[in-house]
Image: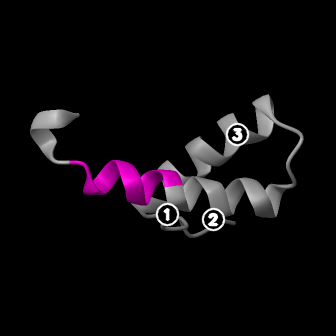
Amino acid sequence: MTSSPVFVSRYDQRIKLVQDVLKEHTTYSDEKCRELAVQVLHTVDTIPEKMR
């Protein structure tokens, strides 16, 4: 019996990484951590490359 691999986009991987860090260092719920992770990644992605 084999299982099919599940595709997870790089964006979702990045969201999960930030979400896990927020969850580890705050008392926020998983849902709130995910909302903040989306905002953080959007902000980082809009910073010009030279400034990062």
Residue 25 on image: x %, y %: 77, 29
47 with respect to 43 (left or right): left
Task: Determine the main secondary structure of the stretch shown in magenta.
Answer: helix
> Which sits in the foreground, 10 or 1?
10
Disc 2 residue type (three-letter) = Thr
Please name the residue that numbered disc 1 is placed on.
Answer: 8
Please name the residue that numbered disc 2 is placed on.
Answer: 2
Please name the residue that numbered disc 3 is placed on.
Answer: 22
Q: Earlier in the sequence, mark 1 or mark 3?
A: 1
Q: What are the residue bounds of the magenta stretch?
A: 40-47
**Residue displayed at 82% across by 36% down:** 26
Q: Is residue 10 visible?
A: no
Q: Secondary structure at mark 3?
A: helix
Q: CA distance from mark 3 to mark 2?
A: 35 Å
Q: CA distance from mark 1 to mark 2?
A: 19 Å
Q: Earlier in the sequence, mark 1 or mark 2?
A: 2
> Quadrant location of the N terminus?
bottom right
Furthest residue in direction left, as rendered: 50
19 with respect to 6 (left or right): right
Disc 3 residue type (three-letter) = Leu
> Quadrant location of the C terminus?
top left
Residue 38 on image: x %, y %: 54, 61
Q: Earlier in the sequence, mark 3 or mark 2?
A: 2
16 with respect to 11 (left or right): right
> Which sits in the foreground, 51 or 35?
51
Q: Which mark is in front, 1 or 3? A: 3
Q: Is residue 26 above or below residue 9?
A: above
**Residue displayed at 68% across by 59% down:** 34
